[in-house]
Image (cartoon, grey):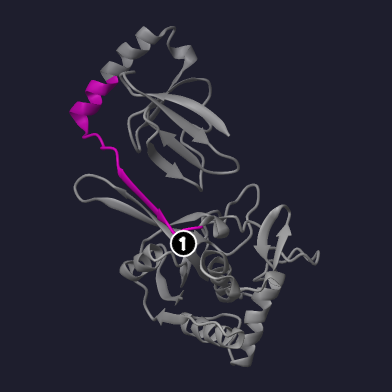
Amino acid sequence: MVKRTLHSPDYSKTYTCYDYFPNGYAIFDESNTKLEFNPNSHSPYYEMGNGTYLYGGPMEYDFVPNKLYVNKVNAINKLADIEKLSQNNAPRLTLPIISLTRIHNYELIENLTDLNRSDNSGNEYNKDGTCGYLAAAIILYHAKYQFNNIFVDDSLIETYNGKRRFKVDLHDELVHIGKKLGKNNDTIASDICDVMKEYCKEKGISANHFWRYLSSAINIDACIRDNKPVALFGNFTDPHTNKRANHVVTCYGTYTEAYAANSSIRYLVVYFGWSSTKENNYSSVYLLDNLFLNPIGSMYNMNY
């Protein structure tokens, strides 16, 4: 982690910026209120050299190299001139109102950073395109600890590389049920709904299963408020490669930045479905909720 002190353009306020490893950053004000947060990239200050870091709010980042100004007084005078030009030529962005909502015990999902098979193959749990079944397994795993231990047998839980996770056997059991029901590896929400109904029937678990042909922000938010993760089926952009693919992610939260003039940016907090590495985090991805960039089709959730 790298910690930097930031200054407002007039040096009247200070802020703190944390760059986390391997990715992610957050900016806090003097009262420790979080002003910005992005878990998928470094801060705008990450590759800047030694000098004075300036922060005027979201999208307003600046840097004064040490060699340009011999003392703070000259820097302030210069920045005052820049500030006047900025005020005359363009309106300043106001700080956003930030809303981050996640289900209870979201850490159970966020900490599933390593879902590689332990058979030395190096393959992911969902190596054959079974991402819908993986999302179903994650939902069951969360339900075990959040609501009722019967959802997943203790024999299917293990500690791997120092972290608790469910064994690949849970994922494979769901795939096996899908094969019995005539389902393919690639699934839609109705397929996973049928598989989960059969799984719960075989285990003697009482639960209600819902799927919707088209998801909506209202339905997703309702699941999050009820502390239930939801499987989203769509065409998503990989946050680290920017490649698009039909895929299933597990949503366990929402993040919204609301600005002036009714402008806002909304993200879905999701487990993207692949194991994380030191370079790329896939267990806590902030997916832009945008119809064109990340079109979501169907959705599945389980109530109990």
In this rendering, the count of numbered labels is: 1
Which part of the image, by quadrant, shows the N terminus? top right
Residue 220 % position (x, y): 37, 67
Q: Is residue 111 magenta?
A: no
**Which of the 4 image quarters holds residue 86?**
top left
Which residue corresponds to mark 1? 252
Left or right of 294, for residue 169: right
Residue 246 appears in the rendering: no
Q: Is residue 130 above or below residue 13?
A: below
Residue 198 appears in the rendering: yes
Task: Work out whether residue 236 or residue 154 is closer to the camera in this orientation and state it.
Answer: 154
- Please tell me which residue is depicted at 62% across the width and 80% down the height of the picture: 174
- Please tell me which residue is depicted at 35% across the width and 67% down the height of the picture: 222
Which element carries disc 1, helix, strand or loop? strand
Residue 35 % position (x, y): 37, 38
Residue 205 % position (x, y): 55, 82
**Which of the 4 image quarters holds residue 158?**
bottom right
Disc 1: CA contacts within 10 A as few (<14), some (14-19) or many (>=20)? many
Residues in magenta, as a range = 82-105
Q: Is residue 40 above or below residue 29?
A: below
Task: Work out whether residue 60 or residue 265 is closer to the camera in this orientation and state it.
Answer: 265
- Please tell me which residue is depicted at 57% across the width and 80% down the height of the picture: 186
Residue 38 % position (x, y): 46, 45
Left or right of 99, for residue 40: right
Q: Is residue 211 above or below residue 162?
A: below
Left or right of 165, for residue 37: left
- Please tell me which residue is depicted at 35% across the width and 38% down the height of the picture: 59
- The amino acid pointed to by label 1 is Tyr
